[in-house]
Image: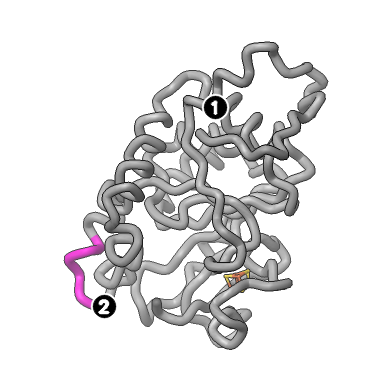
Amino acid sequence: MKVDKKWSRPQKYENGHALSSESHQLERVIEFENYPKSILKMPCQGFSIPAWLCKTGGKLRGIKGSVCSKCYALKGRYSFPNVKNAMQRRFDGLKNERWIEAMTVAIGGTEGSGYFRYLDSGDLQSVEMLEKIAQVARNLPHITFWLPTREYGFVAKYIKKNIFFPENLTVRLSSHMLKGEAPISLAQKYGAVASGVSETGFTCPSSSQGNKCLTCRACWSKDVPVVIYKQH
Ligand code: SF4
């Protein structure tokens, strides 16, 4: 991981434990995407893994009319060798037993926006991955996390075991089909929110503002039950 010159480590986590002196070594565990704010859409950093390894997405890809049949994360800049290699390294890093600590240090030390986005490419690989993401959110209560996913099954298993998500982690269930209804009831059942087609949803304004979020943070908000996106 490349560390920004402005690197400054948080002094303590929520649980009051000071960072270990060897924390800087954790930088090698993960690889961070630092979105150039003037070029890409998001107002913050993110963590993505290969879309070709999506479990549910892999099945949907062959289904006409599914969101995954038009997956933006399998083309364009996502197909550049350096981008693909970086996503693969991030995926490999998920197995590292110090992943939670590494992500906490990396995000806590570099993210000044107060927001963080997971899985611009790729999706949850397991309920264990979701539990790790939730723990990173607990460690960094001053940052709001957005996690979009089509892995409803992992979300159900997480809730069965953990009851609820941290307040600062917004899990947004994405619809499977391009013209499919947003999975609103399912999301409500799990304490999550949704995205997809709905008559009452919030329509993403990015296409009318230079393909950027600018001041909009609807995707991170648990108060926005449905976000409707235009197809990429
Ligand atoms: S709804 Fe708002 S926060 Fe979400 S992607 Fe669109 S502009 Fe960004």
Q: Nearer the viewer, mark 2 or mark 1?
A: 1
Residue 216, by quadrant, is bottom right
Choose the circle earlier in sequence order: 2 or 1: 1
Q: Nearer the viewer, residue 22 or 50?
A: 22
**In terms of secondary structure, where does tag 1 sit?**
helix
Region in magenta:
60-64
Q: Nearer the viewer, residue 109 or 230?
A: 109
As drawn, 96 above or below 2:
above
Pinpoint residue 135: horizontal percent, then vertical percent: 62, 32
Q: Which mark is residue 65?
A: 2
Which image quarter holds the C terminus? bottom left
As drawn, 46 above or below 213:
above
Q: Nearer the viewer, residue 196 or 74?
A: 74
Q: Name the residue type under label 2.
A: Gly
Residue receiving disc 1: 27
Residue furthest out toward the front: 5
Residue furthest out toward the left: 62
